Amino acid sequence: MLRRLSCALLAGLLAGALAWPAGAANDVEQLQLGDPARRERSIDVVLDGVTDTSSGELIDTVELTRRLKDVRVLFIGEEHTNGEFHRVQLRVIEALHAAGRKPIIGLEMFPWDPQPALERWSRGELDEARFLDESRWYEVWSHHYGHYRDIFRYARDQRLRLVGLNAPREVVRTVRSKGFEALSPELRNRFPPTVDVSNAEHRTLVRAYFDDDDPLHSKMSDAALEGIYRAQVTWDAAMGWQAGQALTTPVDPREIVVVLIGAGHVAYDLGAARQLASGFKGRIASLIPVTVPKRINAAYAQFVWGVPATAQPTLPVLGVSLMGRLGQQPSAVIQVDAGSSAEAAGVRVGDVLRSLDGTVVDGTAALQRKVGDYDWGDAARLEIERAGVRMTLPLVFRRAPQDSR
């Protein structure tokens, strides 16, 4: 399976020709990539500690804000379903705000198109239910809103700007299949003046996010793999560049764009930061939470924050993948995760989900939205159709045992 690269990478499985570098490392945090001044060293990550990897020095959040005093864009990597990573993101935003900075929160989960719902939320005009509806959260992002709730509430309470940074799906599809040269001049201006698709270290990094025995990757053609790589570069370049564009003009030195983004886009400063740096004059920094105990390469990020290992995902999921728009039955199950609540309830590949506690399931967005109402241990009734016969399955949301994930 793919490990921690953006979940959106799975959308790039249709595409265009790359010879992937061989010998992917088993541990992405221990690759010798990135900054030559740091990549020859390793450091031990400390639980609840912030480490400046340039020196190996352990610092607190106040000192972190001092060391970020002239940074204009800060990328904070995340595992999308790990609440500990989001807790770190919120702590950094709070610390920067307390230090007198003006954080602008850049979001991977929203496209760069104008997003009135984000502005209305920041002004306190929407409750959470209306925000989820108006922002189309579960259509543009597949993860439980609860992972981000505290960050969004803090942004609303402090009237902080929220900015969508990601490339719309149709843009990613175009680049994936035809390259950046196929974009209109208007769309091309949404990206850095120079977009690098030839960096060997970045290709090594992207390849490293595949397990060596990954059955999906092993069956893909070189053309499909190249399409995945172009999609990854598209996300990196779009989110990096749009983060820099979120700063106001004239320059307010107190502003800092804090980008909430998958760790695969941040690692070794080879993704979004590298693409932004090609045409941006301000200082850029990176921070990634790391589960402990862990020894990592010092070039992994400019700052790392030790967090405890925790069962994943932090909040409930059903544990199925649906057919989506490719078929006539958008709620047909094409995969059941091992150890998931769905597997325990008896859901099988080919079943069509009809409703969850009476709420109609007509696709992934509807399912994700309804699952967001539950907590671990909650019971529900899942109505399915199997071989034309409707039946109801009793369901309990329980975490999968660690060895079955």
Image: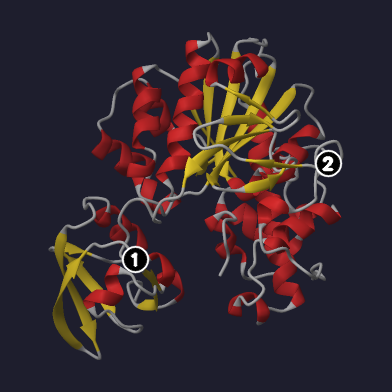
Q: Is residue 188 visible?
A: no
Q: Is residue 205 above or below residue 37?
A: below
Could you tell me the amino acid type at mark 1?
A: Ala
| Numbered mark located on residue 400 in the image | 1
Could you tell me the amino acid type at mark 2?
A: Thr
To which residue does mark 2 refer?
Answer: 194
The residue drawn where x is 58% and y is 65% is: 2
The residue drawn where x is 31% and y is 83% is: 348
Q: Is residue 192 above or below residue 397?
A: above
Q: Is residue 10 visible?
A: yes
Tell me the crowding category of disc 2: few under 14, some 14 to 19, or many 20 or more residues within 10 angstroms, Cα based: few
Secondary structure beneath label 2: loop
The residue drawn where x is 53% and y is 10% is: 99
Calculate the distance from the C-alpha at mark 2 to the C-alpha at mark 1: 44 Å
| Numbered mark located on residue 389 in the image | none
Percent position (x, y) of residue 189? 73, 38
Q: Quadrant of the C terminus?
A: bottom left
Q: Quadrant of the N terminus?
A: bottom right
- The residue closer to the viewer here, 254 or 90, is 90
Q: In the visual, does 42 lie left or right of 117?
A: right
Secondary structure beneath label 1: loop
Percent position (x, y) of residue 184? 72, 47
Q: Quadrant of residue 238?
A: top right
- The residue closer to the viewer here, 16 or 93, is 93
Q: Residue furthest bottom?
A: 387
